[in-house]
Amino acid sequence: MQEKANEMIKIFIDKEPVEAEQGTTVLKAAERAGIHIPHLCYHPAFPPEGSCRMCLVEIEGFPKLELACSTVVKDEMKISAKSERVVKARKAVLEFLLAEHPLDCPICDKAGDCKLQDYYDEYGLFESQFKEAKEKREKKLKIGKSLILDQERCVLCTRCVRFLKEVTTTQDLGVFHRGVHSSVNIYEGAAVENNYSGNLAEICPVGAITDEDFRFKTRSWFLKEGESICPLCSRGCNILIEYHPGFPRFEVPKRVYRIKARENPEVNDFWVCDRGRYGYSYLDEHRADKIIMNKIEGENVLTWENISEYLGEKIKRLSSAKKTSGIALILHTWLSNEELFLLHKIFKDDLKVEKIFFADLPQGEADGYLLTSETSPNRRGAQEIGFDIKPVDLDALASGTDFLLAFGPFLSGLFSPKDLKAALNTVKRKVLFSSYTHELNSLFDIVLPVALIAEKEGSLTNVEGKVQGFQPALEPPGESLPEWKVLSDLGKELGIDSKFYSELPSPEAILIEMGKKIPFFKKKND
Amino acid sequence: MSPEFSEKTKKKIEEIVARYPQKEAAILPVLHITQQEFGSISAEEEKLVARILGIKPISVREIVTFYTMLSRESLGKYHIQVCSNLSCSLLGAGNFVDYLVEKLGIEPGETTPDKKFTLSTVECLGACERAPCMLINFNYYGEMDPKKVDEILDGLK
């Protein structure tokens, strides 16, 4: 099969020659050539179903119209994807699909996201010939944790049924009855309660399955999307973050409204788990947006311009007195490869700091599919860079630490506030890089607000060792900056190996440097 | 109390299941047997069949609700199924159903209080040449009219 997969043949779509892989379908070949053939039931994750009939095309030599989703291409096949006959047939199919559809788009949460609506706009715009009353069905059936099923809007494409059969194998939904009475439903007493339920609302091509988490909070056309990587476990699922850019004279309550899966066959296919999908509140809630100076000698006012100078001076003073043993670091593995690499270079290689701890969220439970037990996204990266991932030892921290640089908000979850306060009180100077306004912040002299993964550039190494780059999807709030910027400035400021730091204008450049030093990170640049 | 098949039926089901490469493929004959044994296929019977065939109850439900010959409600002793499709309708199936409704005092889909008759309208029975036609349990009756149906029903005990 693999041999065949690479053999290319020539077909014609609307008289244009198109290269197609041997054995592929007309629909896939067209998609590859940038030609969209309308479809509702076909989804690339599943074998063709052929139930919606929207993808009809005309093929020379075939007496009837054929389904693009299930017809395999042949050499020299001549396909018309928008001939008069095809358009007429699609119109007819749409009319039948809409015969039982309630047409309640104004109050439908999927309006703007709905393929039926798009196709009606493209092919329909007709008055329905049906005078018969429509069937009454359930319109607000709760079928799972946060899923609502409207059977009237359903076009019976069975994407949801097939997803639950083939991906989760839980078979929570079925098609009951026959003909005009057919409807998707759950078995009584059961519900869609797996960790991938949220994907159903995403793959439903119409307004049948909607998500309570998103329903009626905003309209989808107000939202913009940015690509990112989910940091809530170590799988590194590719995601789209949908955020509201705001209105000119009206404040919206939050930025991020929804997370969607972004296709990546090597990592997460077309899916994202419910933890990743619904756990986005960390992007908006309790965010720090200003530099906080709790304790600082003299009249210094710290800004991002002079922060590296300030930190550099403290470190240099310890370093020149040969007292780098008084420096301690608390890191976490939400930091990118580049940031961890800079930290390793500055503190471990150049300054020979020994007290380096990691404070992460405690391990969770894996679900056997995408969700891993590791709750932070870049532990593997930290290991590959050469860190020995040691948990925080408060006693070691409390003995003879002059200067502590801590990252992340996770420290507070690991120790009681009393123990933490006692240990930190023994440290002379302490600086925290955190994205959150948190009680923990009051224990540090200076708190620097930093960007989250969704707001910066860099790369992460997932549990399988795959290095994935990401770009900012959102603006960091207020004065927040990404850690890599501060760290590369600090490296420059310290003056050790200064040439190295002077040529690091971006995470991309840092990753290239990393590739030269650590073979593991080289493959990404090949 | 969940239902169980009799030992004899169990053996019969085993025989049927053995004919197919996959257990699941035996579902239709097994459902017919279930209906014969219990009179109807309610949720409890669905679960029983699902357990025997190693599938989920929801898959059984999909099939039970698809086929009109399988019933989730318990039926009367005689299940009268009148075709309401094109040929039969053209030859007066509508009036014929009205006559039955009046005679039996029940609407299509209902069972008489004495549990003797259940009336249903169904799609094509594949006997257009004898339209209008009906089924009583597994027996065909063609070219129906009120007089004929009186005779047939009076003959049923």
Image (cartoon, coloured by chain):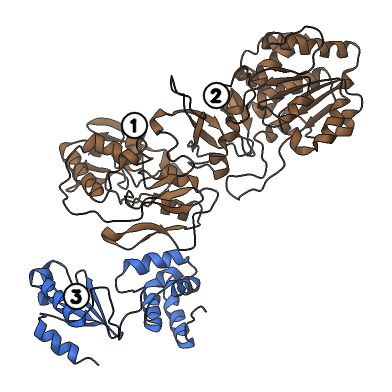
Query: Measured from the top left, where is residue B109 in percent x and y?
Result: 27, 73
Q: Chain of mark 3?
A: B
Amino acid under disc 1 = Ala
Tag nearer the camera, 2 or 3:
3
Q: Are marks 1 and 2 on the same chain?
A: yes
SS category of the residue bearing label 3: strand
Which mark is on residue A471? 2
Q: Which residue position is annotated with label 1?
A: A33
Question: Is residue A134 left or right of A205 when viewed as pictured?
Answer: left
Task: Please tell me which residue lies in front, B107 or B152.
Answer: B107
Camera sees residue B22:
no
Query: Measured from the top left, where is residue A199 in percent x and y?
Result: 47, 45
Amino acid under disc 3 = Val
How crowded is the residue under tag 1: few (<14 C-alpha within 10 Å), some, or many (20+)?
some
Residue B80 lies in quadrant: bottom left
How crowded is the residue under tag 2: few (<14 C-alpha within 10 Å), some, or many (20+)?
some
How crowded is the residue under tag 3: few (<14 C-alpha within 10 Å), some, or many (20+)?
many
Residue placed at 46% from the left, 39% from the top?
A: A214
Tag nearer the camera, 1 or 3:
3
Q: Which residue position is annotated with label 3?
A: B82
Query: Measured from the top left, where is residue B52 in percent x and y?
Result: 49, 74
Could you tell me how far apart the alpha carbons at marks 1 and 3 are, in whole angstroms? Answer: 53 Å
Amino acid under disc 2 = Gln
Task: Find chain B in the image and tell me its colour.
Answer: blue
Could you tell me how far apart the alpha carbons at marks 2 and 3 are, in whole angstroms? Answer: 66 Å
Task: Find chain A in the image and tell me its colour.
Answer: brown
